[in-house]
Image (tube, rainbow, N blue to C red):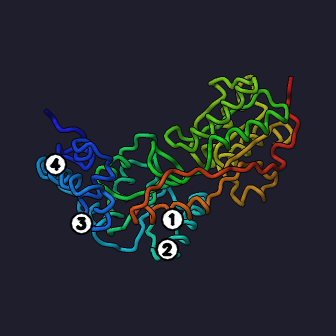
Amino acid sequence: MPLPHLDRTGRPTLRTVAELAGVHISTASRALSDSPRANERSGSAGTIARIREIAEEIGFERNPHGASLRTSESRLFGVLVPRLSDVVLATIYEGIEDRSRELGYQTFVANGRDSPEIRKSALEMLLARRVDGLILGDAQSDDDPLIRSLVDRGVAFVLTNRRSGDHPSVTCDDYAGGRLAADHLLDLGHVAPAVVAGEPYASTGRDRTRGFLDRCRERGVEVPGDRLVHSAFDVAGGHHAAAELLSRPIPPTALFVVNDFAAIGAMGAAREAGRVVGRDLAIVGYNDIPLVRELPVPLTSVASPMYRMGSRAAQMLRDILAGETVGSETMAPALCIRESTMGTGDAD
């Protein structure tokens, strides 16, 4: 009978051992650790012995990077983000760094650029530094191959900014944030909103868009598919997407843009189209970065608790390394209303 969950080279993984032993992968990881405390949390001596016997029978070899996370401490957390130049990610990282320092850890950050090749290379670089665990701010989809590889290798990690599957994460409740944006625009009388939805691989864009569309539907406003355009999470992406939407024969009266930088780009597109933001077109952004309050037309935005997400992610990773059981956490968003949506909309 073929073994389950082999890696790309045909070798058994930690997930292989866990499935054959009928235990959770974290239990298998602890049982194969050299740490007495970790072994104590793996269950009975019989369970530990069975897991180790299966591992030996199938020829499982624990990855040295993953093993180092359990057998020694470097007092170093690795952090992987799409790009630290992004204000949102930089603020999250400040929270990670400050809380890590309080816990006695240093942090080392790398940019993954949302590129599979760069992410993989950056991950290996972080593991080569023998970090005790990882905080990932760049999860892609609910079946991210990079995250799957970390699970198979027994590496301790926490997600923040974006979520993925049932892996431990600290994020904003982006679905609720999308609903806040929808209620605000609908309350202003807009019945023809559109969405600049961000990248489809990121839970942030997906959840914010889904919350917005669901709330509109609940309130009797259907947003057709041609009023939803995906874009990069930057000024250029938002400008291009908004320009496309505003060029339609019946343009939208309001835009929900799932990222503040993309929303700034959308404001530029509105200006080029001869629209006055806040009077002819309402725009709502997301994250509430400090810059948007100082724009010529201050931007209405859904605020996410960026710093607190980072701080809590660092604490959660430390809890995991201490053998604690953790669950994913979502933090509440808040709507900050400004001049970009103060018009009444066109309810006709």
Residue tagged 1: 315
Q: Earlier in the sequence, mark 1 or mark 3?
A: 3
At mark 2, the secondary structure is loop
Dot 2 amino acid type: Leu
Residue located beneath label 3 in the image: 34
Which residue position is annotated with label 2? 103
In front: mark 1 or mark 3? 3
Within 10 angstroms of label 4, few (less than 14), some, or many (20 or more) residues? some
Q: Earlier in the sequence, mark 2 or mark 3?
A: 3
Relative to the observer, which residue lies in front, 212 or 252? 212
Distance CA(mark 4)–CA(mark 3): 17 Å
Q: Compared to 24, does 109 lie above or below?
A: below
Of residues 312 and 87, the one nearer the viewer is 312
Dot placed on the residue nearer the N-terminal end, 1 or 4: 4
Where residue 37 sits: x, y (%)?
32, 67
* Amino acid at the residue labelled 3: Asp
Task: Pick whichever of labels 2 and 4 is earlier in the sequence.
Answer: 4
Mark 2 neighbour class, 10 Å CA radius: few under 14, some 14 to 19, many 20 or more = few
Point 55% across, 52% down: residue: 329
How crowded is the residue under tag 3: few (<14 C-alpha within 10 Å), some, or many (20+)?
some
Q: Residue at x 40, y 40 (%)?
A: 143
Reading the image, the residue beneath label 4 is: 54
Q: What amino acid type should be assigned to the residue bearing mark 1?
A: Gln
| Quadrant of res 254 | top right
Determine whether label 2 and label 3 are within 8 Å by CB.
no
Instruction: State the SS at label 1.
Output: helix
Whole-number angstrom distance, CA of label 2 to CA of label 4: 36 Å
